[in-house]
Image (spheres, grey):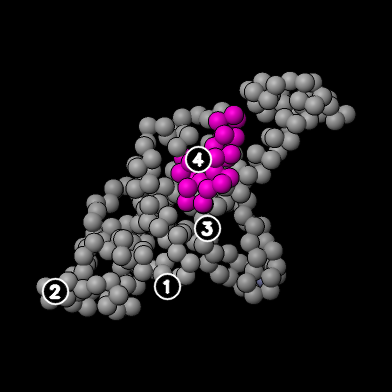
Amino acid sequence: MASISTADLLAAWERGASQSMTRRVLTLLATVYPELSDAQLLSLPIGQRDGLALKLRELLFGPQLNIVAKCPFCNEQLEVGLDVADICVEQNTLQHQPFALAVEGFELQFRLPDSQDLLHIEAVDSLDAARSVFFERCLLSATYEGQECPVDTLPEEVLNKIEATMSAADPQADVELDLCCPECLHSWLAPFDIASFLWTEINAWAQRVLNEVHLLAQAYSWREADILAMSAARRRYYLERVLQ
Ligand SMILES: [Zn+2]
């Protein structure tokens, strides 16, 4: 992973601002993994992509994550602190694709979903259509007694089994936080999406940096590029002087 300058991260944020969430996380990863082509990034299984996004988050803002959640039972807002290591799944063996599965007499072959699949799913507007697109893309073959079966003829039970096998093979793609409400003691599993979490943080960071540039440029007539080339500590020092 390459280090990233303030100006480069800001440029990635600017490109990502008009993109979908799936594209945004790839735009961010492309800045620190210049050796990976767009096609390679697009075809990373979601868990691998999210593992890289967690590493990027740690590089940019450190390992401590502060998560805000709302209790689904009493609406109490809670803040949970956790470490990147708590949700980083170590995968010792690289999964070989495609996967084969036999269930209820069906012989199935499938691959793990990647960002290319998510871009296709984002383009449809209903959950049912999204699920169809998902299986049509990731299910490579389905046969029953040697006969090919179209996706829409497969029983729900078979589709659920495929999804469960995918999750087990790529656990980083389905991170769930075990939360408990301090008010009513209700406990639940909340999905955690590093892509949107990281984007929200980078968005707030970018607003903060641009505001600093605005104040310093106004006070000293410095160029934007020169202000961005300073360390955060140096920018903060001058800003304190300006705001005194
Ligand atoms: Zn509660």
Q: Give percent across and percent down for residue 3.
A: 50, 29
What residue does disc 3 label?
Answer: 192
Instruction: Based on the picture, tell me whether residue 10 belongs to the magenta stretch.
Output: yes
Would you identify the image quadrant in which residue 145 lies?
bottom left
Quarter of image, ligand 1: bottom right
Residue under numbered circle 4: 28
- Left/right placement of residue 211 relative to residue 158 reads right
Q: Give the range drawn in magenta.
A: 6-29
Q: Which residue is drawn at 61% across and 49% down?
A: 200
Location of residue 159 in the rendering, given as x and y in whole percent from the top left corner = 32, 72
Kindly report the distance in space between the C-alpha atoms of the residues bearing marks 2 and 3. Answer: 39 Å
Q: Nearer the viewer, residue 199 or 38?
A: 38
The chief SS type of the magenta part is helix
Name the residue that disc number 2 marks.
147
Q: Which type of secondary structure does the marked residue at label 2 adopt?
A: strand
Q: Which quadrant does the N terminus fall into? A: top left
Point out residue 108 in the picture as x, y percentages from the top left corner: 21, 67
Amino acid type of disc 4? Answer: Leu
Q: Which amino acid type is shown beneath numbered disc 1?
A: Asp
Sequence-first disc among 2 and 3: 2
Question: Is label 4's Cβ within 8 Å of ligand 1?
Answer: no
Front position among marks 3 and 1: 1
Residue 68 visible in the current orientation: yes
Disc 4/disc 1 C-alpha distance (Å): 30 Å
Does dot 4 land on a helix, a strand or a loop?
A: helix
Q: Can I make out residue 84 in this image?
A: no
Q: Mark 1 points at which residue?
A: 128
